Amino acid sequence: MKYNNILIAPDSFKGGVSSVRFCEIVSEKIKKLRPEAVVRSLPIADGGEGTLECLKISAGGKSVFADTVGPYGEPMKAEILFTKVNEAVIETASCAGLPLVYGRMDPEKTTTAGLGKLIEYAVGHGAEHIILTLGGSCTNDCGAGMLSGMGIVFRDADGKRFVPTGGTLGRVKTVEKSAEFAKYADISFTAMCDVRNPLYGDNGCTHIFARQKGADDAMIGRLEAGVKSFSAAVSEALGQDFSQDEGTGAAGGLGFACRAFLDGELKSGIETVLDLCGFDRLAETADLVITGEGRFDYQSLMGKVIGGIVAHSGSVPVAVLSGKYRQFDTSGFPNLKYIIPVSEGQELDYAIAHEPENLRRGTEKLFSIIEKEGY
C-alpha cells in the first residue's frame, strides 16, 4: 500500500519555523516527490503562545478583536476565536503575555484584568463554553485581575474594594461573589494546562515560574507570601482549599482561579487542541502522519505535541522531522516508524536560518526510505 493520504500535523520549532510554515514547506516538497498524494495540513500547538493562530487554521471558526487591557492596564485589543457559535477560545498571552512586557517585566504589578474583559465579551456574544490557554503569562496575581472583572469582590482590612496584583495579594482579607458574577453560573470553562504545579510551595507558581517573569530573590519571597495569604482568604470564603490541586500553579496562579471560582477543568493543552481540530477523525483516513518539533527526545512523548499525535494516530504510522534528536527507546510506540533529524551537526543559529531547506532535505530523505520499503 502506497502512502498516498498524508496528514501533516507538526508543532512549531521554538525560535524557528512556525507549525504553519512547517506545513507549507513539507507539503510543497511532498507534492513534488509524490504528485498523486492527497496532503492535508493541520498545524498544531499545545496551549501556549500561538495556539489561537493554529486553531484558526486547524479548527476554523470566527475570529474577532475585542477591547481589553494589557498587563499594566493599558487599553488594547485582543483576539477571541469562536470555534462554534457558543464556544470561544481566549489566549492568556494575548493580553497578559511575556512578549507584551519585555524590557519592563514586573510580576508584582502585572494583571490578568484583560482576561476578565475578554471573557465578559465572549459570554455577551453567546459563548457558553470558554477555553483558556494558560501558556506564556507574565503575571503572578492568581487570576485576581480576571476575577475582579467578572464580579468577584476583593476587600482589604478596611473593607475597601480593590483589584489585586501580584504585589498586593497579601492585602486581600475578604472575598465576595457579587450579583454580576452570577451570569457565569451556567458557563463551562476549560483551561489548557500542561503543568501540574500546586499554587504555592517549593513547586508552586512563584518559586518555579516567577523568575522568568522578572522576579529576583527578594521579590519571590514577597510574591510567595502574598500568594499564601490570598489562598487563605479564598479558602475561608469558599469553604474549600484548592491550593494544592494539580495545575493550580499554572500561569501565575491562573489555574487556581479557574479551579476555585469557575469550576474549570484543567485539561492537557495538546488533548484540547486535538479535540478542537478533529484530529482523530482525520488520522483515521490517513496512510501516514508527519509531525515534528525543534528537538525530539523522550520528553516529547510525555504530554507534548508529538506525544499526543502518536497516541491519537492509533495504528497509522507516524514520521517525525525534528531539528535535533536525542536517541531514546521508542519500542513502546510501535506506530512511531520514522525519525528524521534534519539539522544534526549544525549550530543552532545556522540551523534556524536554514530550517526551510533542512526540512525539504529531511522530507526527501523520509520519502527515499518510504520508497525503498515499497510504500
Image (cartoon, helix red, strand yellow):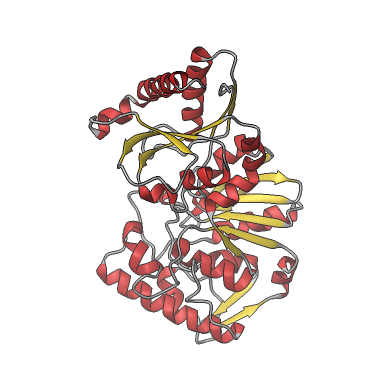
Q: Residue 338 appears at what percent x and percent y?
A: 42, 33
- Horizontal relation, residue 355 to residue 236: left or right: left
Q: Residue 11 appears at what percent x and percent y?
A: 47, 39
Instruction: Identify the residue shown where x is 36% and y is 60%.
Output: 106
On the image, which quarter does residue 124 sit in?
bottom right
Instruction: Identify the residue shown where x is 35% and y is 45%.
Output: 297
Seen in the picture, residue 193 relative to 280 is either above or below; the reply is below
- Horizontal relation, residue 52 to residue 342: left or right: right
Q: Quadrant of the N terminus?
A: top right
Seen in the picture, residue 156 relative to 275 is either above or below; the reply is below
Q: Residue 41 appears at what percent x and percent y?
A: 57, 29
On the image, which quarter does residue 202 sit in?
bottom left
Seen in the picture, residue 193 relative to 76 is either above or below; the reply is below
Camera sees residue 123: yes
Camera sees residue 64: no
Front in this rendered view, residue 81 or 246: 246
Front in this rendered view, residue 29 or 371: 371
Seen in the picture, residue 157 relative to 69 is either above or below; the reply is below
Front in this rendered view, residue 351 or 107: 351
